[in-house]
Amino acid sequence: MFGLAAAALMAGTQLAAPGTAEAAAKCITGDRQAPFTVGWANIYSVPTWMKQTEGTITDIVDQLKEQGLVDKLVVTDAEGNANNQITQIQSMIDADVDAIVIIAGSSTALNRVIEQACEKGIAVANVDSLVDTDQLTVKINTDSQKWGTEAAQFIADQLGGEGKVIIMNGPAGISVSEDRRAGVDPVLEANPGLEVLTETNTAYNSAPAQEAMTSLLFQYPEIDGIISLGGALSAGAILAMDRQGRELPPMTGENYRQFLELWKEKDLTAWATMQPNWLGGLGAYAAVQALNGKDIPAYVEVPLPIIDNSNIDEYLARAGDFPADGYIYSPYDIAMFDKLLGIQ
Amino acid sequence: MGLFALLLALLALYAYLYPGLLSWAGIARFTQNWFPVALVAIAQTLVMLMGGIDLAVGAMVSLGTVLAATLVGGSVLGAGLGITATVAIGVVAGGLVGTIVALFGLPAIIVTLSSSFLIGGAALLVMARPGGSMPDWLSEGLVGVHPTALLILIVLLIAWRVLRATPLGLAIDASGDNPTGAFRSGVNIVAARIAAYAISGGLAAFAGVYVAAQTGAGDPLIGTPLTLQSITAAVLGGVGFLGGQGTLRGAVAGSLLLAVLVNVMFFLGLPPVAQYVMQGLIIVAAMGIKRLRERAA
């Protein structure tokens, strides 16, 4: 295909390539040439998690620039507004970028505009918060249901299947938080001895989680375990319980730096997994490789890394490299991305 | 008319940066993304003209999307009934809120804040997570390659002109401007208030129908940011917080400013941080020009 493209360029003609791409990834027509312009359609740039994610994207894009594969990164911020995100992706299509990396503000709102991008031959990589449509190049995520199941299983194991637990969720109505919660159910069914005292729904922030937990503590004198389905939520729970002098039960969480530090400081029995920030970098890499003619699978499931009392020190040893209210994600590099994407 | 001059300049800049705007499809796509904000700006303005404020506009849009994605059927009749039902629910909910505000004299900000939780909760009850579907032909018709949105907007502005010539329209106008005077001249202020909230609720629900068609599905949270945008658009357009001041035309222009800003900032290639700063500056500039003109007058 590259020989053909070169020949066409030498002949001074445009390469019209409908249907000439073989074994290529979805949305790839084969008529886009490196160096590529990559668009990063962010739903919200302010939260630290998002800033860290953007950091992995610019890092990977810089590496791809050195290889001559990318020449420009365009970044938008929808300010948490799905309607803005539609407009901005539309603008990226109008500006004819070659690839778009998306964290979706809504699992449904972007379907139609993404399908439009795909029709134009733009490589679309959707990471973290996924959309419903399959008219895109690649979706990359961890398994949110498994996240919930493994977290609940850890608590069930710790309590021997018996005890009073509180479930801390992210916001209602958001796919990620609903999926994680759905993963908890099979464990509750298998362990009828686990009694769910109550559940909280807050933003993935420690302050509202702390507030919610504080008012619950007066109501429930006995809490045997906390199934927290978000990192900052667990930190909020610890702060609330600690301030009232409550004993800290086994709990779950995420690779949120403050949580990991409190875990160590209070000598907890805990378990955490993570939504690696480098999903963003991986998305940019996958989209560019797809444009580059590589066959990229339609769905890439990134395995959930596990943090427990046996390996928490490895994570805390790197804590200084991450913001105080950030997430200590596992290391990544291009070789690992190639492996995840099945690129030889 | 500082706002309109600013708007013209920005639209010209947008067309210069992206010449594709000046085509049938380009105009269609741009107005589609602007339309929901324009609708909620109109809804908000109707209430603000009465000296009220509606913090439930965004929640009503969310409820509209999930109702539409549930009720709208595949056939023309099914779609018509579904849209009518959705808008009717918006009218009834808005009317109830208006009744509480008008009859019990409670502050609109409190009543609509609590109704935003009720309506937002109802949206989550209808759909716990984004889903449902809209018929493709409806999406294509409303949000396809033709500027249907622009047409509906023009129809709405004409409808407002016509309404203002009727006793009800006059009542809405008069009771916002000078409630005591209007009351003394026999205007039914209570009815006018309830009507303004009801129309506003219906418009917000219709914005939900449109967003559902635009996205092809319902989303119980998608409307939330629209509350603040509707107020910003209205204030940019010269609508005052005390009632009786401002025009629907101005609010629509304010919403257009918000929409065109997003696009212009993209094509200028501004980084997100600069986008936040630009937005703030433009809003302050638009308001400042207005104030200076008022002083000069």
Image (cartoon, rainbow, N blue to C red):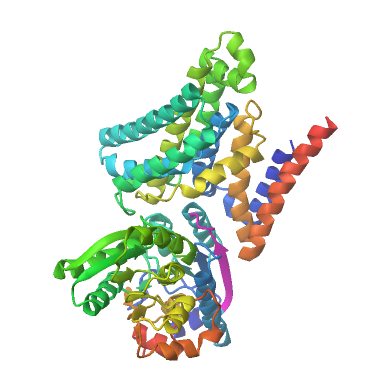
Where is the C terminus of chain A found, in terms of image quarters?
bottom left
- The residue shown at (30%, 73%) is A147
- Magenta stretch: dominant secondary structure: strand
The image quarter containing residue B47 is top right
Residue A88 vertical placement versus B203 (above, below): below
B225 lies left or right of A114: right
The image quarter containing residue A267 is bottom left
Where is the N terminus of chain A found, in terms of image quarters?
bottom left
Observer-nearest of A104 and B118: B118
Residue B296: % across, % down: 85, 33
A294 lies left or right of B7: left
B267 lies left or right of A231: right
Residue B67: % across, % down: 32, 41
Observer-nearest of A194 and B279: A194
Residue A289 vertical placement versus B23 (above, below): below
Residue A136: % across, % down: 37, 66
Which residues are drawn in magenta? A71-81
Residue B125: % across, % down: 30, 46
Is residue B140 at least partly visible in the picture? no
- The residue shown at (40%, 87%) is A312
Observer-nearest of B215 and A247: A247
Asked if the magenta segment contains residue A231, the reply would be no
Residue A77 vertical placement versus B293 (above, below): below
- The residue shown at (36%, 78%) is A273
Is residue A313 at least partly visible in the picture? yes
